[in-house]
Image: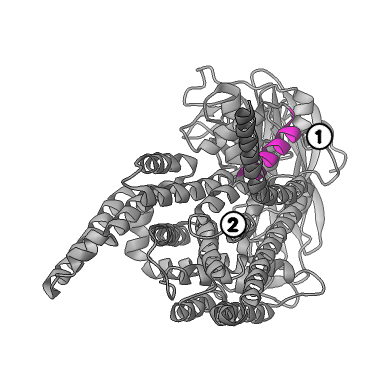
Amino acid sequence: MSSVTTAERAETRALSDRLLAALPLTSVYVWLCTVYLVEAWGRLTPWLFDDELKATQIARGIAASGRPMQRGQHVGFDSLYEYVTAPVWLIHDVANAYSGVKYLDVFLMAAVVFPTYFLARMIVGRTAALFAAAGAGAIPSLAYSGYLVEENVAYPYAALCFFLIAKALVEWPRNRRWAVGAGVACVVAPAVRGELAVLPAMYVLAVLFLAWTSTWARERRKDWTGGDWAGFVALLFGAIFLVSAVLTSASHSWAWATQFYKHRMIDQTGWAAGALAIGIGVIPLIAGLASLFRLPGEAPSRRLRAFRIVLVSALITFGLYTAVKAAYLSAVFATRVEERNLIYISPLLFIGTALLLDRRTVNRWALLGCGAFGAYLVLYAVYHPTQYPYEMNVQLYSDALGLAILQQANRTAPFYWTPQDARWVLLGIVVVGTLVIALLPVVRQRAARVAGALAVALGVAVVTWSLTGEIAAASGGNRTGQLFANTLSPTGQPYSWVDQTTHGAPTLYEGEGEYDQDPEWLVEFWNRSIVSVGSLDGTVGGPGPAGAPNVLPNGKLYWGLDPKVQTPSYGYAVEDWPCVDFEGATAARHWRLAGGTPHLWKLIRLTQPNRLRSTCSGIYPDGWTGSNDSEYFRFGQGQGWLRVAIARPAPGNAAPTNVHVLLGSLVNGPDREPVYGRTLVEKSVHLKSGDATTVWIRSPLQRFAARVVVDVKFEPHLVVPPSDPSYGDVRQLGVQLHYAVVRKAAHR
């Protein structure tokens, strides 16, 4: 009996020891989650469109039908992230579901501390491994944990793959299960996020490096002659060219970047690396790279070799992906600082830093070179990514959250840093941090405790800087969310105002002249009733299908080529009034901001079949006509008077102009769409700057078209007195317009 009791006590002690050992790491995770949950709670609405709306659309489709869908149409597989978050969207209330997804994202992304810790424990002690885990979990990009984006799963998953690959390299061939597990994880990785398609390539590269550095390979190379080395180099370049040729045929972005934008690949990778370095406090980048070089007195270690192989492989694959994507985007979309694609190497850099701090030694020549490289990245490369150093001209740069600490310091008392101030601070960090690491071996030989204190102080400073950057990024993101929330509801009306009225009935959103799509994205996110989205002029786009309906001369809507074929019919529609005017009864009204001015959405209970009463085109959200003038189509109930309110509140040196108002017939065009036909009536008025008038034209037709033509346009940035080309509005403008049809003319 006593032996059983003793065994039970030993087992209990072992369990308690394991729990106590897990407590520090669990505490790091809990504290980080607490900070990020508070930040997520303060994020009022999504705003990183179209990323967040796309993920939401697909996840809602999976929750509703079990299949990925966008705007009522089935789409292909996108990411496992939508499947992970889909169950939360079973919650009907959008606000509660949104909160649930945000909080789930926090727990998922912060979980990066666990694989980082276990990988670090392969080469360093517990305290140093905790530092690496905390650093990986505190980088500024953890602010994405409050966003509905794939990084929330992809970031910790990449760290898990790094750990599995390192274990596979260490355990091979004794325990091949790790190799199988790493292979399965890497094969699944592209389904987590498209960028993680580099992980299988990274695994292959790591295996090749392991073979190259093996004892067998080193013995074989001892007898190589100069010709053998020349042949090997030729084969290596041949393999590189072959891989590049295969990728060129398979990837349009690879082909463009490598053939036409090689210089951009180098420059923009430097920008991304510089932003990452700034976000994590520069020192982890310098020390992480320096850890790749053999330390003084270092004994051979398979685990340390495996870690270095993983770090080198990750630097090559993720760096190359970032270079190609950034260069390609600069050609087809915009020139961006793409730190967002490079954040995955952060856990490895922190582990490399932990190695130097744990052993209190470093290869000083390697440290000097890496320090110079880090200084170049943060003091020069990312100082000139565009015309704005460190992108300090914006509240938050969504693709490079590492810059957030400088952006917020530029806006926060008592700092108000200029780019030059930031440059001096970063220079000080590089010099002091590099000097401390270089002095650790000297101090360790004379006073081990002092060296330990220096290592701890440097580690705490690095994590503090990084977490401060994360808080700055979350703060900037939340301020941006407040602006978007004000755009959606400047008067404080409910965000889900459509759902409250329709109670889930299928609703159509139809816009016109929406040059800023943010309001549409917002109302679509917050109102699940909106299942179809489009615009009459093509200004409303994705994510997801966004085609315009066809319109018959009587205003009837239909989708497809044949109006006789039955097409979807909706119970309600959100119309971008006044240029979209549906037949039906007004069920609700909602004010939002467009072009900085209040605009009205109307929710219409539609007639069956769905019909338009009128539309207009050529009018910006702020009411001005543009270079192509404006047209108005009336599809029914057009008998009476056409009232056209015209104003030209332009600066005093804008030239006067004649304005022509034409009323004509409405006919079918060659593409079976309504077009302006023959002119029946024309009236003209002469306007000077500051003038306003109303033109009345009697209409005997049920259906008609109208056109307003302005003879003399002006460009605001050229006529602001005195002429100031730096003024931002470069549009060609005519007049401000408002159309209406009334039964009786109040004035003629």
Indicate the position of residue 36 as horizontal and vertical percent values: 71, 50
Residue type marked 1? Arg
For this rendering, which residue is in front, 313 or 549? 313
Based on the picture, tell me whether residue 106 belongs to the magenta stretch: yes
Q: Read off the residue under disc 2.
A: 126
> In the rendered view of the protein, which quadrant contains the C terminus?
top right
Residue depicted at x 33% and y 45%: 174
For this rendering, which residue is in front, 244 or 429? 429
661 with respect to 323 (left or right)? right
In terms of secondary structure, where does tag 2 sit? Answer: helix
Q: Read off the residue under disc 1.
A: 589
Residue type marked 2? Arg
Residue depicted at x 40% and y 40%: 181
In terms of secondary structure, where does tag 1 sit? Answer: strand
The answer to whether 159 is drawn above or below residue 385 in the figure is above
- Residue depth check, mark 2 versus mark 1: number of the one nearer the observer: 2
- Give the magenta range: 93-108
Q: Can residue 535 be seen in this view?
A: no
For the view shown, which residue lies furthest in the front direction? 2
Indicate the position of residue 468 as horizontal and vertical percent values: 71, 63
> In the rendered view of the protein, which quadrant contains the N terminus?
top right
Indicate the position of residue 62 as horizontal and vertical percent values: 56, 27
Please name the predominant secondary structure of the magenta segment in the image: helix
Residue 650, label in figure: none
Characterize the local packing of mark 2: few (<14), some (14-19) or many (20 or more) Cα atoms within 10 angstroms: some
> Residue 657 sits in which quadrant?
bottom right
